[in-house]
């Protein structure tokens, strides 16, 4: 099917925001009056797959660790033996929970003054992620992913007269900081060293995870630039003419729609980072920083703490399907040729195309997800607002979850905070089965928006939640996933 951009220019900005946002605070539930009514919820929904149903362990629950937060997104433990937990709050603050389980009265740091101004009602920007250097115990370095104010000017490519602004919306910034030499519970705010910056055209689809892999390199997930159907300022031409335009299928114009891998221990070519020489585009066409590509909004990814170190990534869909991918070096994960395992249709995002390529023009196979869930706007039915990527459980307190992947539905309703936890048993080729995780103290849902996960160095899993859609209020909490005997 061929079509012109002109046929898509009449999309209103409201509808664009409505169906396009994907991050933890997705617009699918903000403007529910414009969305398809909720499909009947199937709490034990199982995707088509070959592996057996899981039969999760009984007596699972969520134990509250901390409350009074605004919009918590993740939990990280530093590799220094202190047993502290660092809580990332979207508004720009990082809090510390000491080894005694108590929250320190003073935040570790507050970078709100370095960020764009956030909308209290809804926002996908802010302080999105934190990662400690593998040698943090000796070098005291850590890294932040946050959205800074935009640079002057705007996108060089305008893919249509959409009525959207042509100036940049924000800057994706990865920065290195150090801990205060006089107080290990405070950051040295004067130590910031900007590692990488990328101008971002829209307010949504920022991606937002940074994490060190087993190889010691820093991995970064960046969304495709925002907007729906890959139209509007900031989306470039790519090889797939049917769905014209889209950063995720172009590896030369910018770094959006990708997972990056960089070496923060070296500097080269005037940049504050080096390039691992086995990155897939070194020595050939494509940005050397790119590790994998073809993502829409890869908001949350994690490494399996086991020897495999596999990358599990939740990529938010548009209107039909949410997905989780196992990321491999050089992999093309299909957006905007495909949404999940299905052929995406940018001319009508609620109708699949009957056919699409299974490879890109460079011969890269389009890799299908391992988990696929129907979106709440899917005409065939579904109740997933947006997938939130989680972690493979490697703790000791819940033996029945060992090696299983825990992830979430941000909310199962277009009208209320009804987040759900799910579990899948990593398997072989094809789509894996999954089921809702039963929790003793909760019903069909946990009564919060699930905004992120965390994992301590013992492999235990934490859930970051809030009852506010946007970064406002004080309903934010951190829960720990526990078995019958709660681990303190």
Image (cartoon, helix red, strand yellow):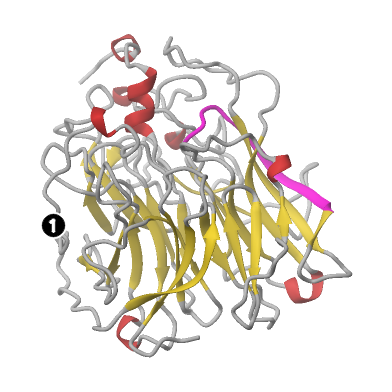
The residue wearing badge 1 is: 42
Q: Name the foreground residue: 345 vs 481.
A: 481
Q: Where 37 sits versus 107, above or below?
A: above
Of helix, strand and loop, which mostly describes the magenta segment?
Answer: strand
Q: Is residue 436 left or right of residue 402?
A: left
Work out whether residue 132 can be spotted. yes
- Picture quarter containing residue 83? bottom right
- Start-end of magenta stretch: 190-204
- Picture quarter containing residue 343? top left
Which quarter shows the N terminus?
top left
Question: Residue 377, percent across and down?
Answer: 21, 38
Q: Is residue 19 left or right of residue 464?
A: left
Taking the spot 23% from the left edge, 52% from the top edge, the residue there is 373
Q: Does residue 405 belong to the magenta stretch?
A: no
Q: Name the foreground residue: 110 vs 373.
A: 110
Question: Residue 302, percent across and down?
Answer: 47, 63
Question: Residue 260, percent across and down?
Answer: 56, 50
Q: Where 401 sits versus 193, above or below?
A: below
Q: Which SS class for mark 1?
A: loop
């Amino acid at each position: 099917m061929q079509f012109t951009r002109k046929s898509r220019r009449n999309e209103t900005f409201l509808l664009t925001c409505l169906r396009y946002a994907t991050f933890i605070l997705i617009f699918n539930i903000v403007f529910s009056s414009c969305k398809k009514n909720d499909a009947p919820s199937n709490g034990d929904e199982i995707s088509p797959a070959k592996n057996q149903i899981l039969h999760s362990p009984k007596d699972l629950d969520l134990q509250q660790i901390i409350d009074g937060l605004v919009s918590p997104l993740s939990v990280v433990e530093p590799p220094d033996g202190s047993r502290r937990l660092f809580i990332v709050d979207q508004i720009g603050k990082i809090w510390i929970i000491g080894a005694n389980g108590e929250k320190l009265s003073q935040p570790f740091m507050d970078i709100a003054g370095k960020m764009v101004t956030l909308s209290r009602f809804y926002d996908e920007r802010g302080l999105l992620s934190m990662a400690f250097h593998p040698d943090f115990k000796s070098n005291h370095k850590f890294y932040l992913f946050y959205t800074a104010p935009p640079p002057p000017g705007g996108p060089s490519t305008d893919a249509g007269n959409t009525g959207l602004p042509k100036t940049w919306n924000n800057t994706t910034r990865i920065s290195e900081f150090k801990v205060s030499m006089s107080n290990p519970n405070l950051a040295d705010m004067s130590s910031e060293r900007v590692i990488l910056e990328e101008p971002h055209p829209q307010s949504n689809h920022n991606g937002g995870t940074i994490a060190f892999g087993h190889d010691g390199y820093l991995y970064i997930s960046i969304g495709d630039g925002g907007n729906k159907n890959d139209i509007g300022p900031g989306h470039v031409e790519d090889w797939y003419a049917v769905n014209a335009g889209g950063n995720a299928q172009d590896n030369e114009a910018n770094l959006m729609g990708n997972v990056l891998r960089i070496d923060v221990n070296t500097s080269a070519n005037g940049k504050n980072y080096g390039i691992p020489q086995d990155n897939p585009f070194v020595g050939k066409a494509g940005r050397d920083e790119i590790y994998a590509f073809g993502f829409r909004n890869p908001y949350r990814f994690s490494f399996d703490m086991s020897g495999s170190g596999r990358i599990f990534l939740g990529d938010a869909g548009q209107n039909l399907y949410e997905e989780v991918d196992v990321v491999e070096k050089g992999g093309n994960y299909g957006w905007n040729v495909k949404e999940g395992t299905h052929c995406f249709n940018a001319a009508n995002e609620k109708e699949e195309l009957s056919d699409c390529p299974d490879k890109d023009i460079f011969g890269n196979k389009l890799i299908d997800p391992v988990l696929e869930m129907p979106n709440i706007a899917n005409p065939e039915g579904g109740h997933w607002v947006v997938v939130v990527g989680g972690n493979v459980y490697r703790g000791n307190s819940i033996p029945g979850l060992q090696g299983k992947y825990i992830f979430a539905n941000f909310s199962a309703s277009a009208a209320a905070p009804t987040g759900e936890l799910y579990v899948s048993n990593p398997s072989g080729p094809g789509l894996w089965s999954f089921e809702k995780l039963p929790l003793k103290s909760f019903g069909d849902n946990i009564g919060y928006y699930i905004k992120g996960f965390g994992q301590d160095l013992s492999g235990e899993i934490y859930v970051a939640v809030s009852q506010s859609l946007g970064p406002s209020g004080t309903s934010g909490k951190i829960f720990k996933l526990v078995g019958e005997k709660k681990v303190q």
